[in-house]
Amino acid sequence: MKSNFLKIGTVAVATLLFATTSCSDEGIEAGLETGEEINASHLPKNVLNKVLELKMNPNEFEVEELVHLDGTVSEVIVTSGDMAMDKERFLGIPASTEGFAKQYRTEFIIDTNLHPEVNLFVYTGGPILVDGEPRLIGFSAGAQQGIIDALENWNSVRSGLTLKAEFSSNPNLFDENVHETFIAVNLTLPGFSGRAGFPDEAGNPGSFFIISPIANQAAPNVPDAIEHLITHELGHAIGLRHTDWNSRQSCVDLGLEDAPSVETNAPDRIFGTLPSIPGIIEQEDSIMNACFGETDGELNFFDEFAIRNLYRRSFSYYNY
């Protein structure tokens, strides 16, 4: 039986095996203090203007290229370390919104009437070139097992949301009418990391997630860590935000960040899950914490409760 650890009161010292930031699709808390210096020269003007219009912190945003399986490139806006949104979608956010994402949930979740099954396309083939340079490669055998384990994690909850995967070495078989999400290895990602899109306003799941080459190569030697990473990124793609969004305490405990910080705009807490209160209530083993070290790669009780609450078809099975 897997054990779940809830930290209440004191902060325990974490043993660091693999430390990784999780992924990214969400907005940044409003309310920059008057006079605060904004170092936003890295953002294109139109993106910077939208960030300021939404009363978010420009320092929390990056613009990155997303390489698709056909070799085309688009731009995505990345925040909170590993969550991403298509640039045009970001620029189209109404100024009246309090952020672009709301166990904490994103602003939008998957419409299971439109998507009774979410079909993932897992690329397993050779390099995909952009301007003659390799930018994407396929999942290793170890990382493919991580996909299988991650699907089992979410599907075993019996939430009413079903995830399936097709593995192929032929990128031309990816069909947007069949596969809602594509998965590949991005050769430009650093460390043991990933990125994921999140559900959109039409009720579609995140359209992609990617992992780093280090994670891909290390997967056979650290099966629990790769299972954790992929389960986490899938969590973003199906509608979950970071459990410790308001402190990133998991990253601080692991020594990856110097001090607590607040991620993008305050999200909605999922009914029935614990709030994150730094130093008082912390879920050390949540799969959706921003960073992780030693792990069994499994969901904790509140991760399970969260996804079951979002997709309620089998909710009565547990008689809550």
Image (tube, rainbow, N blue to C red):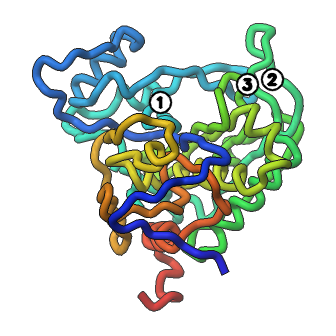
Q: Is residue 89 above or below residue 275?
A: above
**Which residue in the structure is indicated by mark 1?**
78
Residue behind mark 2:
128
Disc 3 marks which amino acid?
Leu
Mark 3: secondary structure: loop
Marked residue nearer the N-terminal end (1 or 3): 1
Q: Tell which of 180 and 305 is nearer to you.
A: 305
Which corner quadrant holds the N terminus? bottom right
Residue sitting at x 33%, y 59%: 276
Percent across and percent down for residue 4 are 54, 73
**Residue drawn at 35 percent across, 29 percent down:** 92
Q: Would you say residue 311 is visible in this rendering?
A: no
The dot on residue 158 is none
Q: Is residue 191 left or right of residue 62?
A: right
Q: Position of residue 142 (x, y in %)?
A: 85, 49
Residue under numbered circle 3: 187
Task: Name the residue at 54% across, 40% down.
Answer: 21
Sequence-earlier tag: 1 or 2? 1
